[in-house]
Image: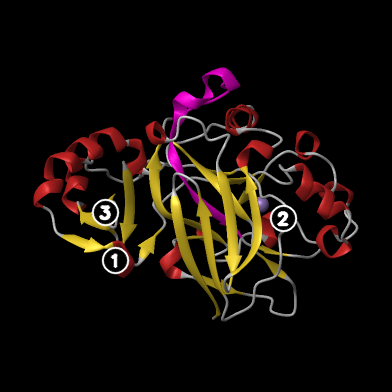
C-alpha cells in the first residue's frame, strides 16, 4: 500500500494516478493524552489504520496525484538518522573535492568509522512544501537517498532480524549546507529533510538493496545510481543504529547518497525518483 499525507494534514491512499482521501481511517488511533508518546502514532498503528483504510477506500473521495500537495508521510518522527558517505563513489568524490570535505578528516573515512548522524526532526517537510534555502553565500547541495521508515520499536537488533522492523520506504532528500560545521547543524535547517511523495509499505519492496535512484535539477540529470552500491545495506544500517539508540515507530533512516551531489539555487526544480516508489518534484526557493 502507498500512504500519503497531503493538503492540510489529510491521509491518502495512492492507487495508480489517484489519491483516495482516507483521513477517516485515522479515527482508529487511540485517544492520546499528555505526555504524548515519543513516536509517530500513525506509523505505530499502521496495520490498524491500513485495515480501516482498505474498508473505506471504495467510497472515499478521490483526487488526481498531479493536483495534490504532498506532505511528509511521517509527521512526527522521534529522529531522522543520516548515513554519511555510504556509497564508495560518493566517498571518492568527497575525498577529491575540498568544497565538499572542507579539510575535515572525518568527512573522508568510511561509514563504519564515521558512524551515523542526526538531522533535526524540525527539518522535515514533504515535497509539496518545497526547500527554503538559507546561507545563500554558501554551497547548498542535493542528496537523493532511499529513506527507510521504522515500523516497530527496536533496540540492539541484528541485521538478520532487522527487516521485521521496517514499515516501508520513501524518497529522501538530505539537503546540505557545505562548510566546516557539524553535520547536525548544516543538515538541519527547516525543510532540509524532504520525505515523500508517499510511504510504500515494506511488503511491496522485499529487496531495498537493488533499486535505481536518480535526481534531476531543472531537467538535467545529476545523480543516477542503484542502492546495490550502498556500503552498508538497509539491514546493516538498522543494526548499526539500534546498537546506539532505540529506534521508534516513524523514525527515518536516510541511507546515504551516491556520487553526483551538486549545488541547488532558489528557482530550481528538483525531481527525485526511486524505482518501486515513484517520483517527487520539489521546488527550491528562498524565504
Ligand atoms: Mn546524505
Where residue 83 sits, quadrant-wise, is top right
Q: Residue at x 66, y 57 (%)?
A: 223
Q: Are marks 2 and 1 in contact (CB under 8 Å)?
A: no
Q: Is residue 97 magenta?
A: no
Q: In the rendered image, which residue does mark 3 sit on?
A: 11
- Tell which of 217 and 175 is nearer to you: 217
Q: Residue at x 81, y 61 (%)?
A: 100
Q: In the rendered image, which residue does mark 1 sit on?
A: 8
Bounds of the magenta segment: 153-174
Label 3 and label 1: CA atoms lie apart by 10 Å
Q: Is residue 168 magenta?
A: yes
Task: Please tell me whether residue 146 is drawn above or below residue 144 in the rendered image.
Answer: above
The answer to whether mark 3 is within 8 Å of ligand 1 is: no
Where residue 28 sits, quadrant-wise, is top left
The answer to whether mark 2 is within 8 Å of ligand 1 is: no
Indicate the position of residue 166 as horizontal and vertical percent values.
46, 32
Query: Quick one: label 2 or label 1, which is nearer the N terminus?
Result: 1
Q: In the rendered image, which residue does mark 2 sit on?
A: 183
In the image, is 41 to the left or to the right of 108?
Answer: left
**What kind of element bears circle 1?**
loop
**What kind of element bears circle 3?**
strand
Task: Please tell me whether residue 163 is drawn above or below residue 18 in the rendered image.
Answer: above
Indicate the position of residue 123 as horizontal and vertical percent values.
54, 60
Where residue 153 sits, quadrant-wise, is top left
Indicate the position of residue 284 as horizontal and vertical percent values.
55, 74
**What kind of element bears circle 2?**
helix
- Tell which of 34 and 88 is nearer to you: 88
Amino acid at each position: 500500500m502507498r500512504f500519503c499525507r497531503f493538503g492540510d494534514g489529510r491521509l491518502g491512499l495512492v492507487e495508480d494516478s489517484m489519491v483516495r482521501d482516507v483521513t477517516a481511517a485515522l479515527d482508529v488511533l487511540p485517544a492520546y493524552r499528555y505526555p504524548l508518546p515519543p513516536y509517530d502514532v500513525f506509523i505505530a498503528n499502521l496495520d490498524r489504520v491500513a485495515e480501516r483504510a482498505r474498508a473505506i477506500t471504495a467510497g472515499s473521495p478521490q483526487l488526481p496525484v498531479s493536483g495534490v500537495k504532498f506532505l511528509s508521510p511521517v509527521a512526527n518522527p522521534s529522529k531522522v538518522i543520516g548515513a554519511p558517505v555510504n556509497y564508495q563513489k560518493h566517498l571518492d568524490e568527497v575525498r577529491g573535492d575540498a568544497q565538499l570535505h572542507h579539510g575535515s578528516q572525518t568527512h573522508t573515512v568510511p561509514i563504519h568509522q564515521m558512524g551515523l548522524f542526526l538531522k533535526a526532526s524540525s527539518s522535515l517537510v514533504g515535497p509539496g512544501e518545497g526547500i527554503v534555502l538559507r546561507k545563500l553565500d554558501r554551497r547548498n547541495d542535493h542528496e537523493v537517498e532511499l529513506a527507510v521508515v521504522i515500523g516497530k520499536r527496536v533496540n540492539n537488533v541484528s541485521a538478520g532480524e532487522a527487516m521485521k522492523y521496517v514499515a516501508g520506504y520513501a524518497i529522501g532528500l538530505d539537503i546540505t549546507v557545505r562548510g566546516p560545521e557539524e553535520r547536525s547543524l548544516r543538515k538541519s535547517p527547516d525543510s532540509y529533510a524532504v520525505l515523500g511523495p508517499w510511504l510504500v509499505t515494506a511488503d511491496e519492496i522485499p529487496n531495498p538493496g537493488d533499486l535505481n535512484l536518480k535526481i534531476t535539477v531543472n531537467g538535467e540529470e545529476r545523480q543516477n545510481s542503484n542502492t546495490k552500491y550502498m556500503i552498508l545495506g538497509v539491514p546493516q544500517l538498522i543494526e548499526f543504529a539500534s546498537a546506539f539508540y532505540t529506534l521508534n515507530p516513524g523514525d527515518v533512516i536516510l541511507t546515504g547518497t551516491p556520487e553526483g551531489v551538486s549545488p541547488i539555487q532558489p528557482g530550481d526544480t528538483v525531481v527525485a525518483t526511486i524505482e518501486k516508489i515513484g517520483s517527487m518534484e520539489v521546488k527550491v526557493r528562498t524565504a
